[in-house]
Image (cartoon, rainbow, N blue to C red):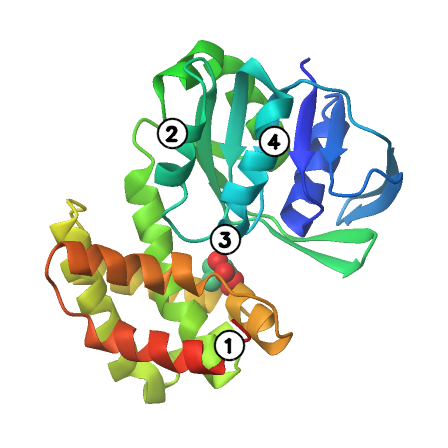
Amino acid sequence: MPLWTVVGQGAIGLLATARLHQAGYPVQLHRRSSAPFDFIFQSADDAFSLSFHTPLTPYSFILLPVKAYAVVDAVQQLLPLLAENAQLVLSHNGMGTIEQVLPLLKPKQGLWFLSTSHGAFKANQTTVIHSGKGQSVLGALNQAAFAQQQSVEEAMQAALGPLVVEGDIKPSLWLKLAVNAVINPLTALHQCKNGELSRSHYTSAITLLIEEFVRVANAAGQDFSVETIQNRVKQVIEQTAENYSSMQQDFVKGRRTELEYITGFLLRQAEQHQLQLPAHQALYQLLLQKSPR
Ligand code: PAF
């Protein structure tokens, strides 16, 4: 089994690391600090600890589950450490990084995107809890990815499966974007759990956001109906009713949010297609004014 390198120490990265280890993969962590790092993994049916030291280079298989705004910097930093035919898997909320990363890679370096609904959180700096079993969608983004297709798919199945492999991952990314563009900014602004959004008080705001989303998605070649998006958003609100969204949590803790890669991405797409999105624009402005950056 090939050696995988997971970048960062976020909850999803540590979850993937623990599950790769459970499946028998050699796995190491790339972190900013070279100090040894131990963490404890807990799930409904398992608990164990793992220790990491200085990682071995060059890296051939890399999972990069870092926030969208940190992706380009992380990739720039990794470039000198990557094997000529390295395979890099991005995984985050929002869109806009793929176009930034593709031109940075060498011809034989493969790029992938994995979108996951697994839930994990860090109870403290060194304990990660697998809080909700989810699933993932994986897609290759360049020709070089196909050279190592089987290895990447098998490992991602172990790390964050059950896995669906899509020939074109863009529709799945747009669908996830719809969910994030409605739930995340509203819950951040109103400081509420996702489930609050099912109250009738929010119905007209959500409908407007969805109608605007569908207009821009359609202009960008994504064939969604308002009804499809409405059903999906409703389903996620119900399934994650007790959760605070990632943007709500970042916002309340004064951390940078993914707004630029969620609503910001949508607004940039709208501009390209000469569309106005007043409801998204208003949410964006309100959150920008209140954000730490
Ligand atoms: O960003 C998040 O928190 C999640 O993607 C989602 C689906 C909105 C659930 O909270």
As measured in the structure, the alpha-carbon distance from the residue carrying label 2 to the one carrying label 4 is 14 Å
Closer to the N terminus: mark 2 or mark 4? 4
Q: Amino acid at mark 4?
A: Leu
**Residue corresponding to mark 4:** 78
Residue at 75%, 36% (x, y): give it: 18
Q: Nearer the viewer, residue 274 or 113?
A: 274
**Residue corresponding to mark 2:** 103
As measured in the structure, the alpha-carbon distance from the residue carrying label 4 to the one carrying label 3 is 16 Å
Residue 32 percent coordinates (x, y): 74, 43
Residue 161 in view: no
Quadrant in the picture for residue 236: bottom left
Q: Amino acid at mark 2?
A: Pro
Quadrant in the picture for residue 38: top right
As measured in the structure, the alpha-carbon distance from the residue carrying label 1 to the one carrying label 2 is 31 Å
Answer few, some or many: residues within 10 Å of disc 3's Cα (few below 14, many 20 plus, some between 14 and 19): some
Camera-side mark, 3 or 2: 2
As measured in the structure, the alpha-carbon distance from the residue carrying label 4 to the one carrying label 1 is 29 Å
**Residue corresponding to mark 1:** 291
Q: Is the residue indicated by label 3 positioned so its CB lies within 8 Å of ligand 1?
A: no
Above or below: residue 66 compared with residue 143: below
Closer to the N terminus: mark 3 or mark 2? 3
**Residue corresponding to mark 3:** 69
Above or below: residue 158 compared with residue 67: above
